[in-house]
Image (cartoon, rainbow, N blue to C red):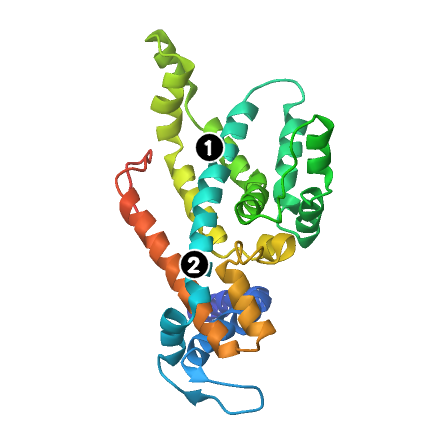
Amino acid sequence: MVQIMQKRKIKKYRKRDYMGLVYIAPWLLGFLLLQLYPFVSSFIYSFTDYKFFNEPSFVGLKNYIRLFKLDPEFWGSLKVTLLYTVITVPGKLTMALFIATLLNRNVKGIGAIRTIYYLPSLFGGSVAVAILWKILFMSDGAINNILSSIHLPTVQWLGNGKSAVVTICMLEIWQFGSSMVMFLAALKQVPASLYEAASLDGAGSVKKFFSITLPQITPIIFFNLIMQTITALQNFTSAFVVTGGGPNKATYVLGMKLYTDAFGYYKMVYACATSWVIFAMVMVVTLLLFRFSSGKIYYEDGGDF
């Protein structure tokens, strides 16, 4: 009798395990077909010479050698991408932390204000907002009209290389909502007793911020740094929609080069090689950030990576 009951329990547990697999089957199927398969196949195709309606032929590192040695556009795009990343990541994190600090106050209507500040993150990455951004910064757009109305010189935001880079960087920095929410949550977790003790010792607001607030929220700062760096290195939408990579390829980031090679010149395997260079660059930058941050991140349990 006992053995029969145990067998029934085993069958019940097995059925429960199978039900779990059924529930995750849609995600698992999507991961295998839409993520893992393209990921692996793009790596394989990057070592081949493949054209539509022809069988792929193995060429080794030819695509990568051509990319690094024979394609001047690659180095220009890499330079633009790194410049874009260096400008947007610190700017976005600084803006997000600044707004989160302002919103970390118990005042009337603060919930509605927080929602308003979070809205840019909901719409900022869309094509529609990128088009709106382009309209705002056109030569006869709203920004130049405002400058003219207060008798200030207008700027060719999209017609000059340097100003075009600044324009798409401002679009990325404007999308600080998600980082701001995480900073705000981290600020609320800082023990109030630390601020009270600092006040008794005569510390001012600036001293409290740099001696208490920043060290306490370093895990969230590091997380946002990693995520925003990865996002910036893969940028495509703002450069494609707002400036089209111009003028004179001043905003021609690696994401745009990949898209142009694949769908403009139909060099799919060459685009695959470019995508794996971007992936390797993201991995290297991420590992370097982890390496140099070791021992500099504060955890309450004293843990490390």
Return the x and y of residue 77 as percentages of the image width and height: 46, 60
Tell me the CA gap for discs 1 and 2. 34 Å
Would you name the residue on which mark 1 appears? Answer: 186
Q: Residue at x 25, y 39 (%)?
A: 295
In the depicted structure, whether residue 85 falls above or below residue 282: above
Q: Residue at x 50, y 92 (%)?
A: 55
Q: What crowding class fits label 2: few (fewer than 14 Cα within 10 Å), some (14-19), or many (20 or more)?
A: some
Would you name the residue on which mark 2 appears? Answer: 78
Nearer the camera: disc 1 or disc 2: 2
User: Mark 1 belongs to which amino acid?
Assistant: Ala
Quadrant of the snapshot with the N terminus: bottom left
Q: Residue at x 68, y 31 (%)?
A: 147
In the depicted structure, whether residue 143 falls above or below residue 135: above
Q: Is residue 49 visible?
A: yes
In the depicted structure, whether residue 222 falls above or below residue 196: below
Return the x and y of residue 269 as percentages of the image width and height: 48, 78
Disc on res. 71: none
